[in-house]
Amino acid sequence: DDKYGTGNMAKKYSRDFLLKFADQFIDLPEGFEVKSDIADVLSNANISSPHLVERDSF
Amino acid sequence: SSKLSKGLVHQTHPLENSWTFWFDNYSAKSKQADWGSTMRLIYTFTTVEEFWSVYNNIHHPSKLSIGTDLHCFKYNIEPKWEDPVCANGGKWTITYGRGKSDTCWLYTLLAMIGEQFDHGDEICGAVVNVRNRQDKISIWTKNASNEAAQLSIGKQWKEFLDYSDTIGFIFHDDAKKLDRAAKSRYTT
């Protein structure tokens, strides 16, 4: 297993190891709030409507 | 496919440090807003899996609008000169043509979160500044006067990016006083 480096403390991960996960985690993390003030930096592709936070619906 | 993955329990890979994505917009700042007041926190991630979940949903530099600053800093370090951890620090910077920095931004992030730098403790975080003509990526560090550590970080960064031109290190103190006239104190 190549995920840990030789150091006895730090959790080291090589670029190649990290890249193996790139395509496996494409949904936003649970609990991520898509607030309007950060909408500009979000790419819409993987955002499904349940993540959207409605603030004025009550 | 997302439904399938939800049924599985993933083994997660914790990172040595927690990191926070922030963004800011330079053009908003110039509208007389206090510096930093337009800074927005995007998300703090603690595992390899969370990193990709966020990274895959935020624009890469080539898709960000002009004037955007996208930061990835260690948890509890704010990407500003005034932050006590950054106050005595400085930064290495690499400049790219507009829209040409996506791969290097990703490789910079992966090197940081994967703790590939020998002096990783010295690192505060990284930022990409998207401007009219160019994208700039900088790595911010803590103790600018520690020349050996800064040079090590600069050299390793160039190796990770396979970048061969000379890069310079500017002290935040100099940048505060001299703005664009600040000169590199170290080069590699």
Image (cartoon, coloured by chain):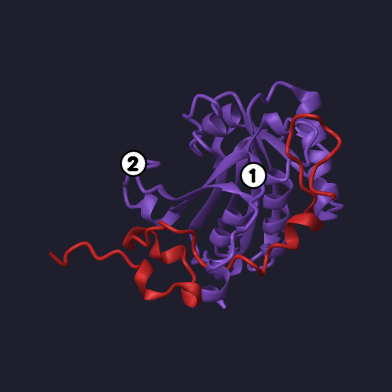
Based on the displayed image, in which of its 4 quarters is residue B4 positioned? bottom right
Looking at the rendered structure, the kind of residue marked 1 is Pro
Disc 1 vs disc 2: which is toward the camera?
1
Quadrant location of the N terminus of chain B in the rendered image: bottom right
Give the x, y percent position of residue A1.
84, 50
Residue A51 in picture, x, y percent from top left: 37, 67
Position above or below: B150 against B52: above
Q: Residue furthest top?
A: B145
Residue toward you, B119 or B113:
B113
Seen in the picture, residue A44 relative to B174 is either above or below; the reply is: below
Percent x, y for residue B61? 59, 63
Instruction: Give the residue displayed 61% in from the left and 41% down from the top.
Output: B125
Local secondary structure at mark 2: loop
Amino acid type of the residue tagged 2 in the rendering = Asp
Find chain A in the image and tell me its colour.
Answer: red
* Numbered mark located on residue B105 in the image: none
In the displayed structure image, the side of residue A43 where residue A14 appears, left or right: right
Callout 2: chain: B
Left/right placement of residue A29 relative to residue B105 reads left
> Closest to the observer: B38 or B30?
B38
B60 shown above or below B158 = below
Residue B138: where, in percent of width, then height? 65, 46
- Colour of chain B, in one word, is purple
Chain letter for mark 1, please: B
**Number of the label disc, if any, that sits on residue B14:** 1
Dot 1 falls on a residue whose secondary structure is strand
Which image quadrant: the C terminus of chain B? top right
Task: Point out which mark residue B34 bears.
Answer: 2
